[in-house]
Amino acid sequence: MRAGVVRTALGVACLVLFLGHAFSYWRLPAVSALETYLYDVRVRFSPPGGSTQQVVIVDIDEKSLGELGRWPWSRDVLAVLMDQLFATYKIRLVGFDMVFSEPDDSSGMAVLERLAAGELKGNADYRQALEKVRGQLDYDRRFAAALEGRNAILGYYFADDARPLAAEMLPRSLFPLADFPELAWQFQVTRGLGTNLPLLQAAAAGAGHFMPQIDVDGSIRRVPLLVSYGGQVYEALSVAMVRQLIPNSVLQLGVPDPDAGIEWLEISNDTQRLRFPVDAQLATMVPFRGPERSFPYLSAVDVLKGRIPKAELEGRIVLVGTSAAGLFDLRNTPMGGTYPGVEIHANLIAGMLAQTFMSQPYYVAGIEGGVLLVIGCLLIFVANRMSPAGSSALMLALLVLAVGFNLWLWQDARLVVPLAGSLMLLFLLYGLGMAWGFFVESRSKRRFTALFGQYVPPELVEEMARAPESYSMNGRSDDLTILFSDIRDFTSLSEGLPPDELTHLMNEYLGAMTHEIQAHRGTLDKYIGDAIMAFWGAPVADPKHARHAVLAAMAMQKRLQAINLDFLARGWSAIRIGVGINTGRVTVGDMGSSVRKAYTVMGDPVNLASRLEALTRHYGVGIIVGEETRAVLPDFLFRELDRVRVKGKRKAVAIFEPWGVSTEASTEQLDALNLWHEFLTNYRGRVWDTALEQLGALPDSLVNASLRNLYQLRIEQLRVNDPGEDWDGVTDLLSK
């Protein structure tokens, strides 16, 4: 009896759990991940259909780059392309999946201007000739003239890290956000953008942004159609192009229920109406027509040289973009991982014109909840009284019905109703009914390993699993040591390697560095591009967390030397890294959003560790630790580098370079360290001449060129501008 009650209670708890996910009271990552996969499967195997010939992509492909040279091309070439598209091929509309943000100086006009202002300043004939060719050599104006009066829509982008632009650089907005204050919560707010030259933007018929919504797995499934910037609302490239196609059209917000917000957007005039659904973030699901190149692709060079039959372009909607791998516009989508970004816009435009969008209105949560209730009640209260064979038959019947009903809604009603939760609940309750005892006994350990296995070394996971009740992912405050590392000059390194070789290099580098971190009992927090974040002291308590962190950093630098020998043997560049370490009280636990969570640390010591890593470049050293770390390691040998005041902190902090354990230091190392600290004493005492003399006498083995030049320049500046007797020797590095 008791076992039956427990079994029922567990089943009800599972049902409530999935219902809560369905109604967005909480998020279950596994369900979300499976739902993403199932959505992709349905998209791949049930394209919306209809013709794709109305939209044509003029592709800056490898062939074009081979004949015309690398991108970007001069704007006079683009002017010719515009003339070809409209005058020769008589297209309806063109949109550019690119941004023309920088002036074109490829004509050599700047050189001619410098000659006119310099060596040939008094040459009237030269000045006269220059004025004659000025119009021909101003490629931006030639391109603008080619855009003027034609159905041409330029693209631009929004980004949180972009610098705000002047008001005259902004494209035309749709309306002020203040016009719809009750709906403002739906609009994504951005802080910056990158847009086109004002000359070009003014000449074009309009502009639209391309800002795809990238899911946690890196794939693009939705695109925001409206976003907010600076209190104004701006439209996506696809919306701008479709509006341009419909004369005298207006864009309206579909708000059938004010509490539910905007459910669709509508472009209409007196004779035509196009409606497309949006979600709570005003994004729409991309109606993919098929795998890449489902739309006609025409090489840009063939269009420029008139090699394309007129019938293939006449009356068409044209998107100018690229499929060339080297131009970095290949995206991950449900249709593949090398999907040209320009084709996403093509799918959106075709979907708007054909009205083939899928929708996911707010009431689909009720449909999903009803399916979950049917499955849950039957498997919890009915299957319990059935034989194993009967339960299996019931489970199979429910499986067929759930999948069939979902596919019917997808295909006939074009509704995206989540399926993953229903399937997972079905199999979970069935498994619970078949072997719930075993599940109860082993569940805790398996869940524990899944939670922590990605963060900590396997041996620590085993240690934790022996007493799982002692560990938790809940947030807590504790003294930990945090480490940040980053590759110097990574941009130059990445630009010099093909993508596959860069991938191999990064995998080997990150694997080796992670090994050293975990070998010293560290917890891997995350990879941030080429950067690594780790911490010591959680989830397993470690009284020697600072020691292990410093030893790990030194081991990483040593391991890097061996890695670089291998990299050089392969023809790759050697890499250098900077490591910042700090100790302090932080908050550690499972943090994030309903979409994604991670076991991580937060707090001021974390920020300082990151800034210390950035300072390694400034001082030319491999490792910098904070004074809190140094204070708990009295048996370590440290070289004090400076006292600094970093951005975000009022209090100055001393920064140090670790040299290893004191007992292992040689006499030469100790003597050299004493010389350095004597120099620092004279420097902070404003004894400039003595300090400068000592700095010059220090051996290169102790002072690298960057550090020597840094202090030489400081002393020279301070001798000229004496800071006064109350100077504390602190260096302000507020930009770091």
Image (cartoon, rainbow, N blue to C red):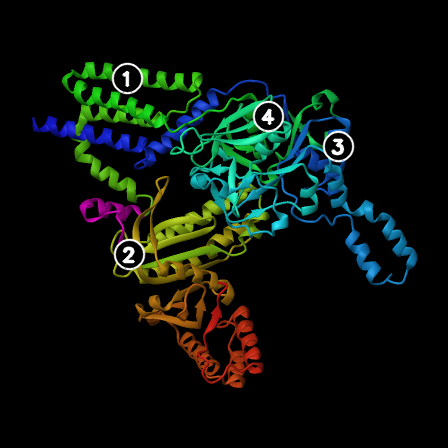
Three-letter code, disc 3:
Leu
Q: Is residue 463 magenta?
A: yes
Q: Which mark, residue 269?
A: 4
Q: Tell me the quarter of the image containing the N terminus.
A: top left
Q: Is residue 177 positioned above or below 6 on the image?
A: below
Three-letter code, disc 4:
Asn
Q: Report which residue position mark 2 lands on.
A: 537
Q: Nearer the viewer, mark 4 or mark 1?
A: 4
Dots 3 and 2: beta carbons under 8 Å? no
Q: CA distance from mark 2 to mark 1?
A: 48 Å
Q: Nearer the viewer, mark 2 or mark 1?
A: 1
Q: CA distance from mark 4 to mark 1?
A: 47 Å
Earlier residue among tags 3 and 2: 3
Q: CA distance from mark 2 to mark 4?
A: 64 Å
321 vs 575, nearest the viewer: 321
Find numbered disc 2 in the image and state the secondary structure of the residue it sits on.
loop
The stretch of residues the image draws in magenta is 456-477
Q: Residues within 10 Å of mark 4 (few under 14, many from 20)?
A: some
Q: Which mark, residue 398?
A: 1
